Amino acid sequence: MLSVAEAFARVLATIRPLPTETVPLAQSAGRILVENLHADRDFPPFDRVAMDGIALRHAAWAAGQTEFALEGAQYAGAPAVPLQNSQAAIEAMTGAVLPPGTDVVVRYEDLAISNGRARIRIPPLAPGTNIHPRAADRRQGDLLLPAGTRLGPAEVAVAATVGAARVRVQRRPRVALVSTGDELVPVDATPLPHQIRRSNTYALAALFALDGADCTTFYFPDDLPGLRQGLPALLGGAFDAVVFSGAVSQGKADFLPGVLRELGVREIFHGVAQRPGKPLWFGEVAGGPVVFGLPGNPVSTLVTAARYVRPWLQSSEQPSRSMPPSVAALAEAVSFRPALTHFLLVRLRADAQARLCAEPRPAGGSGDLAGLLDADGFVELPADMTDFPKGSIWPLWLFK
């Protein structure tokens, strides 16, 4: 069997960039930008009033004048109102254009206003106080959002302010999620004593939705002719990845690897030295999707999806994305004897030093679906060790 590192390298070697598309800005959140967006004007585009108060000439205040007649008011969104009398002032609201002829703003909190006059109750401030100067943040033409940026709330706001009503982004990954097994019934059915409801495709869809994947679910019973007839439609160009759950181990009804080979899927590996998830299968179709065959037990399914499939999807969108995203320290010592990479389920907490700690969460085997409720993810413990001390730091893979 391959090591985890070897298997992961082979998975990443199949990554291909996703196609691009242009979408309305309102539909761009979470997408990867594939064009550069520049400032179409200065940020801010004018000297901007930063506090509600009065705008005046600093020279008059510095010369000892503390009482100013109010000529009018400057509101946000209104054209500039110049100061006519250098010994007077203009009321100015936050976000407004700084009235021409003024160079300092005094807050209302520092004033006494009556009968159209304002008296300043504090010593003179420096020129420019409470003013956000034009181009202080960015200048016209500056690169604001380079290609490759994931569009979050701040990025979408910046795109809006430069007038990018539509943006060029990478298409979301399209994933077919396929569950197999005669024991599975629909989620809204009442299972017989020997049956269970389908849950793995729901878990996978929820996991991949965190990265914006568009998922479509399918089901096949353990029927060799049915697989031969139904799978070709999934292996064409409609999907970027096809993810199976179940039928990849050594059982007499585990037909999937053989059928995939019959249908022209190139097997890249079958079996990885890891626990859980040792029977993991991976291949690709020439000119078509990659194919993941995940073990069907729910813990194995979710762990291998988080360790292999999700990074593939993330890298297809953003090749520079680091994996895993973080590390954690073991909250207690752990021993694991088999010469396999151990994916240890953990719950996360912060210690007194604000360090991320991983508390091992026991599970009743790879079929313990409810045991996943206590886990945030898993740490990856290498195969060449058996004892892992408290406080040792390991790669962390998340379910959330």
Image (cartoon, rainbow, N blue to C red):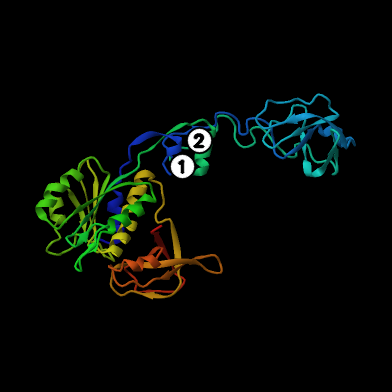
Q: Position of residue 147 (x, y in %)?
A: 44, 37
Residue 162 seen:
yes
Q: CA distance from mark 2 to mark 1?
A: 9 Å
Give the labeled residue for mark 1. 151
Q: Residue at x 73, y 25 (%)?
A: 81
Relative horizontal placement of residue 22, taking residue 142 as reference (left or right): left
* Of callouts 2 and 1, the N-terminal one: 1
Q: Position of residue 167 (x, y in %)?
A: 43, 33
Relative horizontal placement of residue 166, taking residue 173 as reference (left or right): right
**Where is the C terminus found, in terms of image quarters?**
bottom left
Q: Residue at x 33, y 74 (%)?
A: 336
Q: Position of residue 106 (x, y in %)?
A: 78, 39
Relative horizontal placement of residue 24, taking residue 104 as reference (left or right): left
Q: Amino acid at mark 2?
A: Ala
Q: Nearer the viewer, residue 190 or 141?
A: 190
> Relative to residue 326, is residue 59 depicted above or below?
above
Q: Amino acid at mark 1?
A: Leu
Element under label 2?
Answer: helix
Give the labeled residue for mark 2. 159
Q: Quadrant of residue 381?
A: bottom left
Q: Nearer the viewer, residue 191 or 131?
A: 191
Residue 380 seen:
no
